[in-house]
Image (cartoon, rainbow, N blue to C red):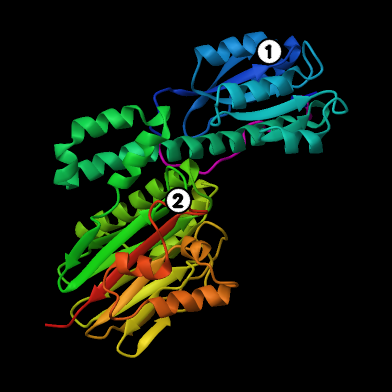
């Protein structure tokens, strides 16, 4: 029984959050329970709670059929407080299956509440059902209920924001590229169909990529991205910071497919925001790789995205040919070839979004007049036939030299064929210079 009488303040103190731009003025909370008293006590305990300056709007259902009707009528329910035993011993669990497997609703947060824990053991339920919390009614105090609701709403908000990042970013990209202006109508149509299939999502993601070949000063950039599924968790970009400096990076989001591809949209927006701040004279870490990675690490953890990113970010200054870079768990290490041969730029660290307090350091070197710099995602090691990771890394090192001046040539040497089925996303980027004028 919810113990609102025990003297706890049911409204936990929360720090101010960023304003949320959603259509509704309240968080919708659906209470599903066959005991009318539970509905009344729940509403009483939570009625004064506010999260991000928005209160709660309560919806009630007393059985699974009513809950299904509510879900059909309201597609923006943020949280369900769900009883396990109602018209049947497992009615609540069957409703969870319906929400996740038939409605394919992965956004709504679900907290199971049960007065009969023996009917649905917590360990088994947590492992077998896609729920976010499990509470026994006899132990669920007003304070614990309020805390659980706030945590669930924060998780719901993170998922909604990640899912909407692609639309926000596409607006910025459309403003900056003539190509998107020319195909805006077709692209907008694809965005409208984004949630109906991965095909539209792939087109959006690949539109965010830079030109396949691009020159900045006397340095040439090129890349090739080959997803193992329809969408990729790998990403690359290169862009001018000012008249003499260029930034570039390669990133590999944990996992692959649609979920990881959404995080690449988040990453692109993060870098675009930092670049915009620099260009408008504001505070920015765009030219300081280690600080930028530290900021990205903090933001991913704060937003609880649920993914981590292995990323190598570098800034090349053409005035003195200095390369300043920092690595956040990207492997294999970048490979540099010049007149002295080829070598890895070793820099050990942890991916961003994995641990609080991760530390990143800048490394610097002066590039030769003629050089090749190869960046690869770890998918390249999956396609090499050598036995053992050391042999594969040595094979890759020996494949890069000053004579290898295109990614197609490199792929031929590595035996990577475009139509081949890939076990993991595979991305290659080459930065090169033939000589200094």
Vertical placement of residue 82 versus 165, above or below: above
Quadrant of image for the C terminus: bottom left
In percent of width and height, residue 257 lies at 48, 44
Camera-side residue of 12 and 354: 354
Q: Residue at x 50, y 54 (%)?
A: 424
Q: Position of residue 97 (x, y in %)?
A: 66, 24
Tell me what residue is drawn at x 49 percent, y 60 percent. Answer: 352
Badges 1 and 2: C-beta atoms under 8 Å apart? no
Which residues are the magenta region? 5-19
Q: Earlier in the sequence, mark 1 or mark 2?
A: 1
Please report the residue visible at 50 percent of the width from the left and 16 percent of the height from the top. 74
Q: Nearer the viewer, residue 126 or 416?
A: 416
Q: Is residue 390 left or right of residue 196?
A: right
Residue labelled with disc 2: 233
Q: Which of the 4 image quadrants contains residue 167?
A: top left
Q: Percent from the top left, x then y, of residue 145? A: 69, 31
Q: How many marks?
A: 2
For residue 339, which quarter of the picture?
Answer: bottom left
Q: Which residue in the protein does label 1 denote?
A: 64
Toward the bottom, the furthest residue is 340
| Residue at x 33% of width, y 65% of height | 429
Magenta segment, prevailing SS (helix, strand or loop)? loop
Q: Is residue 238 above or below residue 176?
A: below
Tell me if residue 292 can be seen: yes
Estimate how packed mark 1 is, as few (under 14), some (14 to 19) or many (20 or more) residues with alpha carbons within 10 Å: many
- The secondary element bearing badge 1 is classed as helix
Q: Rounded to the nearest whole Å, what is the CA distance between mark 1 and mark 2? A: 38 Å
Residue 70 in picture, x, y percent from top left: 57, 12
Quadrant, the N terminus = top right
For the residue labelled by badge 2, is the local secondary structure a helix, a strand or a loop?
A: loop
């Amino acid at each position: 029984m919810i113990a609102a009488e025990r003297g706890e303040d049911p409204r936990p103190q929360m720090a101010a959050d960023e304003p949320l731009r959603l259509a509704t003025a309240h968080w919708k909370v659906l209470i599903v329970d066959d005991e009318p008293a539970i509905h009344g006590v729940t509403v009483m305990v939570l009625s004064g709670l506010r999260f991000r300056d928005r209160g709660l709007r309560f919806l009630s259902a007393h059985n699974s059929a009513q809950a299904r009707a509510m879900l059909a009528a309201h597609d923006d329910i943020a949280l369900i407080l769900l009883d396990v035993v109602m018209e049947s011993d497992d009615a609540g669990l069957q409703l969870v299956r319906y929400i996740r497997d038939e409605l394919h609703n992965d956004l709504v947060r679900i907290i199971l509440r049960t007065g009969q824990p023996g009917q649905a053991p917590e360990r088994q339920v947590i492992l077998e059902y896609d729920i976010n919390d499990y509470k026994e009614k006899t132990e669920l105090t007003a304070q614990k209920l309020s805390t659980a609701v706030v945590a669930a709403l924060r998780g719901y908000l993170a998922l909604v924001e990640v899912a909407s990042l692609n639309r926000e970013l596409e607006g910025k990209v459309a403003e900056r590229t003539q190509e998107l202006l020319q195909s805006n109508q077709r692209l907008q149509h694809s965005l409208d169909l984004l949630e109906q299939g991965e095909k539209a999502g792939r087109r959006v993601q690949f539109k965010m990529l830079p030109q396949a070949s691009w020159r900045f000063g006397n340095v040439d950039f090129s890349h090739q991205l080959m997803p193992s599924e329809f969408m990729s968790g790998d990403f690359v970009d290169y862009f001018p910071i000012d008249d003499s400096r260029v930034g570039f990076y390669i990133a590999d989001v944990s996992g692959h497919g649609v979920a990881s591809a959404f995080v690449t949209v988040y990453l692109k927006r993060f870098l675009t925001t930092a670049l915009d701040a620099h260009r408008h004279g504001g505070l920015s870490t765009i030219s300081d790789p280690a600080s930028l990675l530290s900021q990205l690490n903090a933001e991913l953890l704060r937003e609880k995205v649920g993914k981590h990113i292995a990323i190598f970010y570098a800034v090349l200054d053409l005035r003195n040919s200095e390369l300043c870079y920092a690595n956040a768990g990207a492997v294999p290490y970048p490979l540099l070839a010049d007149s002295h041969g080829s070598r890895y730029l070793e820099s050990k660290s942890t991916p961003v979004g994995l641990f609080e307090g991760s530390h990143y350091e800048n490394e610097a070197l002066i590039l030769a007049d003629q050089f090749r710099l190869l960046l690869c995602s770890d998918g390249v090691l999956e396609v090499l036939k050598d036995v053992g990771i050391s042999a594969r890394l040595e094979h890759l090192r020996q494949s890069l030299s000053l004579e290898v001046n295109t990614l197609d040539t490199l792929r031929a040497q590595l035996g990577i064929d475009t139509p081949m089925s890939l076990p993991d996303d595979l991305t290659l980027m080459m930065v090169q210079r033939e000589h200094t004028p």
